[in-house]
Image (spheres, rainbow, N blue to C red):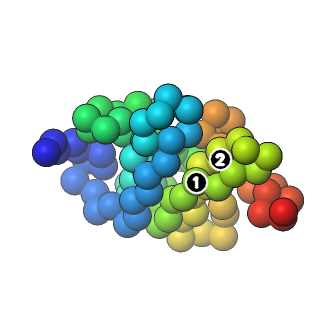
Amino acid sequence: MWRTDVGHGSMNHDLWCADIDSDGKQEIFAANASGRVVCLDLKGNIKWTFTPYDGVHRTPMYSVCVVKKENKPYVVCGDFSTDCCRDWKTRTETLEQGLFQG
């Protein structure tokens, strides 16, 4: 068992696990009240963080999940605003309309 501070004392609102880098090991995603999504490895090490806003005020991040389109995984997160963000690689893209269409 391990313990990692992912939000400077902030509450985590949602957790999700999925292998997004095809290494055979799942990553752990935490959406927290500090307005960030944090990606952890299975040992609790922080791999990356995502903060969609650069301003002083950050809306708490409420949910996170992983979806696939054409077998490519996308990390999708939502906060208490009306925004929904996707894809940790592009950092700030808003969700495309066609992402959930089969």
Q: Position of residue 38 (x, y in %)?
A: 41, 44
Q: Are marks 1 and 2 in contact (CB under 8 Å)?
A: yes
The residue sitting at the left extreme is 1
Quadrant placement of the N terminus: top left
* Residue 74: numbered disc: 2
Going 33% across and 61% down the picture, which residue do you hit? 12
Q: Secondary structure at mark 2?
A: strand
Kind of residue at disc 1: Val
Is residue 70 visible to the viewer in this orientation of the structure? yes
Can residue 93 be seen here? no
The quadrant the C terminus occupies is bottom right
- Dot 1 falls on a residue whose secondary structure is strand
Q: Is residue 5 left or right of residue 52?
A: left
Q: CA distance from mark 1 to mark 2?
A: 5 Å
Residue drawn at the location 74% of the way across and 56% of the way down: 95
Which sits in the foreground, 3 or 61? 3
The residue carrying pointer 1 sits among few (fewer than 14), some (14 to 19) or many (20 or more) residues within 10 Å by Cα, namely: some
Residue assigned mark 1: 66
**Residue at left offset 65%, top offset 47%:** 74
Occupied quadrant, residue 49: top left
Query: In the rendered image of this protein, does residue 55 appear above or below residue 99?
Result: above
